[in-house]
Image (tube, helix red, strand yellow):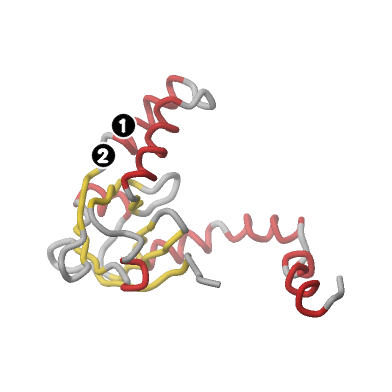
Amino acid sequence: MELNTGSDESTLDDKGRISIPVRFREQYQGRLIITRGYGQPCALIMTPPVWEYFQNELRYSEKFTQEERDYFEIKYLDQAHSVELDKTGRIAIPSIIRKYAKITRECTIINSINRLTVWDSGVLEAYLAENEGVEKAARNKVSSQDIFKVGIRENYGKE
């Protein structure tokens, strides 16, 4: 089984570029779109097909009011930039996105199947610590035995 997700560390250089980890580069080649993280203080990087879906959902979904769509337009769509990996696998993060995500030097890059998020490593740790209650509430709903039940059933023949 190939793991399509994961995280790696990177460093923002003096020109505002980060190196995309080699294991993610095959999935993220050519033109990419970068914008503010959707509800999270990070940079969000997508391929053009994912970007098209994302912007159509924000612009046209009937799940949102017109006021919400207008807000999303300004916050996420109007601040998006088209970028490309350079020949050494680096991508430039526009200053407006770096400022929003508080990206300074040490970064964590997370591949979430169809998008990359780039976090300032300190901001990520603070975000996780601040939102630990979300995890605790979720864990109270499902036991670890339930989470790993599939592996137990398939590998050991028991519930």
Residue that numbered label 1 is attached to: 74
Q: Is residue 155 left or right of residue 158?
A: left
What secondary structure is marked by label 2? loop
Front residue of 41/88: it is: 88
Residue that numbered label 2 is attached to: 79
Q: Residue at point 34% right, 30% down? A: 73
Type of amino acid under label 2: Gln
Tell me the quarter of the image containing the N terminus: bottom right
Residue 10 spot, x, y in % from top left: 30, 72
Residue 50 spot, x, y in % from top left: 39, 45
What secondary structure is marked by label 1? helix
Q: Which badge, 1 or 2, comes first in the chain's sequence?
A: 1
Residue 149 spot, x, y in % from top left: 78, 68
- Real-space CA distance between mark 1 and mark 2, rounded to the nearest whole angstrom: 7 Å
Mark 1 in CB contact with mark 2 (< 8 angstroms): yes
Q: Residues within 10 Å of mark 1 (few under 14, many from 20)?
A: few
Q: Quadrant of residue 125?
A: bottom left
Q: Is residue 23 above or below residue 142?
A: below
Q: Is residue 31 above or below residue 20?
A: above
Q: Of all residues shown, which one is farthest toward the left?
A: 15
Q: Residue at point 51% right, 71% down? A: 2
Front residue of 88/100: it is: 88
Front residue of 82/79: it is: 82
